[in-house]
Image: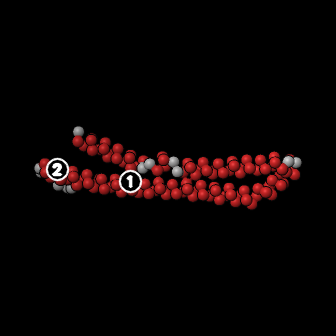
C-alpha cells in the first residue's frame, strides 16, 4: 500500500486495480511453483514403479530357478517349490506397485497451498469491503 491516501474514487479504484493485479500475479506464481513440485512427485512415483519392475524381473530371472531347485529338495516337490517362490515374488511386485501408485494419486497433484491462499485472500478482501 502507498503511504499517501488517495483523495478521490478514481485514485481508490486505480490502487485497487494495481493491488488486484499484483495479487493475481503472485497467486499465479504460487500455483505454477506448486504444480511443478507436484509433477516432480509424479515422476518419483513413475521411477518407483520402474524400479519395482526392474527388481521384480531381475529377481525372477536370477533367483527363481535356483530357489525353486533348493526348495524342491526341502519340500520334495518341484511344483510346490515353484508356487511358493512365485507367490513371494508376486507379493513384492504388488507392494512396490502400490507404493508407486500412491505417489501418483490425484490428491498428490492438487495445488492445495494455492487453493488455501486464494480462500484466505478472498476472506481478507471481503473483510475489507464490509
Q: Is residue 56 above or below residue 87?
A: below
Residue 121 in the image: x percent, y percent? 32, 46
- In front here: 100 or 127? 100
Residue 122 shows which numbered tag? none
Quadrant of image for the C terminus? top left
Residue occupying the far left of the picture: 8
Residue 100 appears anywhere in the view:
yes
Residue occupying the far top of the picture: 130
Figure coloring: secondary structure
Q: Is residue 50 above or below residue 74?
A: below
Residue under the image location 47 percent in, 56 percent down: 39
Residue under the image location 13 percent in, 51 percent down: 10
- Mark 1 element type: helix
Closer to the camera: disc 2 or disc 1?
A: 1
In the visual, does 42 lie left or right of 59?
left
Residue 76 in the image: x percent, y percent? 88, 48
Residue 31 shows which numbered tag? 1
In the visual, does 37 lie left or right of 7?
right
Q: Please tell me which of labels 2 and 1 falls first in the chain.
A: 2
Circle 2 residues within 10 Å: few <14, some 14–19, many ≥20: few
Residue 12 shows which numbered tag? 2
- In front here: 40 or 16? 40
Residue under the image location 80 percent in, 55 percent down: 67
Count of numbered badges drawn on the protein = 2
Residue 6 appears anywhere in the view:
no
Amino acid at each position: 500500500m502507498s503511504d499517501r491516501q488517495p483523495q478521490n474514487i478514481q485514485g481508490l479504484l486505480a490502487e485497487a486495480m494495481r493491488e488486484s493485479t499484483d495479487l493475481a500475479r503472485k497467486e499465479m506464481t504460487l500455483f505454477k511453483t506448486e504444480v511443478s513440485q507436484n509433477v516432480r512427485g509424479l515422476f518419483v512415483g513413475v521411477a518407483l514403479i520402474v524400479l519395482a519392475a526392474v527388481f521384480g524381473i531381475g529377481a525372477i530371472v536370477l533367483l527363481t530357478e535356483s530357489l525353486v531347485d533348493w526348495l524342491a529338495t526341502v519340500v520334495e516337490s518341484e511344483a510346490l517349490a515353484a508356487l511358493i517362490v512365485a507367490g513371494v515374488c508376486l507379493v513384492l511386485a504388488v507392494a512396490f506397485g502400490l507404493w508407486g501408485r500412491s505417489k501418483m494419486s490425484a490428491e498428490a497433484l492438487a495445488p492445495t497451498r494455492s487453493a488455501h491462499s486464494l480462500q484466505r485472500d478472498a476472506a481478507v478482501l471481503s473483510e475489507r469491503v464490509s
